[in-house]
Amino acid sequence: MSNEPQDTIASDESVDTIETVELATSETSAPAETGEPATGLRPANANRGAGWPASFSNYISQGWAERADAHPPQRAQAPYAAARRRRLSEAYPGKRIVVPAGELKVRSNDTDYPFRADSAFSWLTGWASDSEPGAVLVMDPSGDGHVSTLFFRPAAGRDTDEFYADPAIGEFWIGARPTLGEVSTDLDLATGDLKDFVSTEDDLVSDDAELAQTLSEMRLVKDEYEIEQMRLAVEATSRGFDDVVAQLDRAQRERRGERVVEGVFHARARLDGYAVGYETIAASGSHACILHWTRNDGAVLAGDLILIDAGVELDSLYTADITRTVPVDGKFTDAQREVYEAVLEAADAALAIVKPGIRFSEIHDAAMAVIARKISEWGLVDADAETLLDSEDQRHRRYMVHGTSHHLGIDVHDCAKARRELYREGVLEEGMVFTIEPGLYFQPDDLTVPERYRGIGARLEDDIVVTATGAINLSAGIPRTVADIEAWLAR
Ligand SMILES: [Mn+2]
């Protein structure tokens, strides 16, 4: 990437050179003379900039065509975001509510991580992967409700030096920002210039623990727009899994074949969405026993299972979260099939009970009943399933230490700040979306495990939406049974 504004001097040159630059810039004149970012967002690379002489600044500020104001159609999410703001307004009468999108985070010196707006901000505005860093939603009390204004840094004109002199936000550097009018039409929200936003001591800001909890709990039940986004995120993720399966031969040829899996999925995520919703887990062989294996630097070998846990985050920021465990060479061994089919049975048992009115924790209990029975039957623990499932026992959890389900939406671990009584002990309602993801992980050095199972890890993760009478498995189309997986890999 290009990283130096109008630079003619290498950054690693001597102190003499830096002094020369300072001398040169001090002799130039207004309007923009130093090469510092016009906004002062971050310290300039004063040791690298060549300065802006007046003749240059005068020349570059002229000779540009007029730009017509863009009037995009209102985006589909706008009325849903408005309804969400009304719910929040009702919860906090008379309070000024401030929800920032967040700022860019520095990766190193003057380079940043890709920007990703705060989830509550995006949920309340509908402004998603195209959000401007630094934007702030303000809900001012008015009458018996609130009036909302979205403040952000709008497009800068050619009458400032920002467009050429500011590598962090200048149009020549990162592209143009939208205008206030454009965003207002797009999101159906009043907009204002960020420089006119004033915070007050009485503001209720979204990092307030109680407000963050309220926002998390409001997001537990998804609206129609969100459920459609979840369906689309799963579809994109399904294409990513197809891509990975088609590239398993290549993965076997590379020294770090897990990176082939990660890279192929990432390409699909960028093609069809904004990013991956979380770091892809590409865990081959006994790496599958490491729950969040994201180092992904291992080989992918024939005879092993590979566990792939990945999700595409759409431009709307809604993400899928799906796991499949497949045999690298296309055929399960007997031991691998036994372990995998136990996990599948646990997943199906959990899915079978999902409907409005049951408790979220019952899903986990249904899956764990199967896991405990298998652990007992296989003799890993010398006890019957009933004994193991006693809350004072739980030894079977040695082989699956994680939960079975988490809410899913704009965050992969959605609604994380909701209270336990509405989350783990919460009662299912139509429109909730969550994962079901049991697994079994037999560590290669676990002496309690029969040798034939050691080093086998398997997880199956589907994305579930609660309907009026039951549930839909959004990811049912991605092969789940041994026969379907083997047929998938044979294609
Ligand atoms: Mn998950």
Image: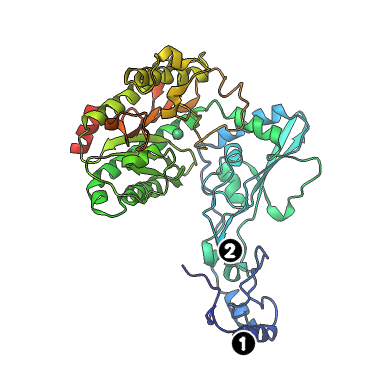
Task: Assess whether mark 1 and mark 2 are in contact (beta carbons under 8 angstroms).
Answer: no
* Residue 262 at x, y percent in the picture: 36, 48
Foreground residue among 290 and 51: 290
What residue does disc 2 label? Answer: 168
Q: Is residue 30 left or right of residue 370?
A: right
Left or right: 149 as drawn, with respect to 343: right
**Mark 1 residue's CB less than 8 Å from ligand 1:** no
Q: Quadrant of residue 283?
A: top left
Q: Quadrant of the C terminus?
A: top left
Q: At which x and y percent is residue 89? A: 70, 31
Nearest-to-viewer mark from 2 and 1: 1
Q: Which residue is mark 1?
A: 16
**Mark 2 Cα-neighbour bin, 10 Å: few <14, some 14–19, many ≥20:** many
- Disc 1 marks a residue whose amino acid type is Asp
Task: Calculate the distance from the C-alpha at mark 2 to the C-alpha at mark 1.
Answer: 27 Å
Mark 2 residue type: Ala
Residue 445 visible: yes
Look at the picture and state if 245 lies above or below 115: above
Image height check: is 273 above or below 441? Answer: below
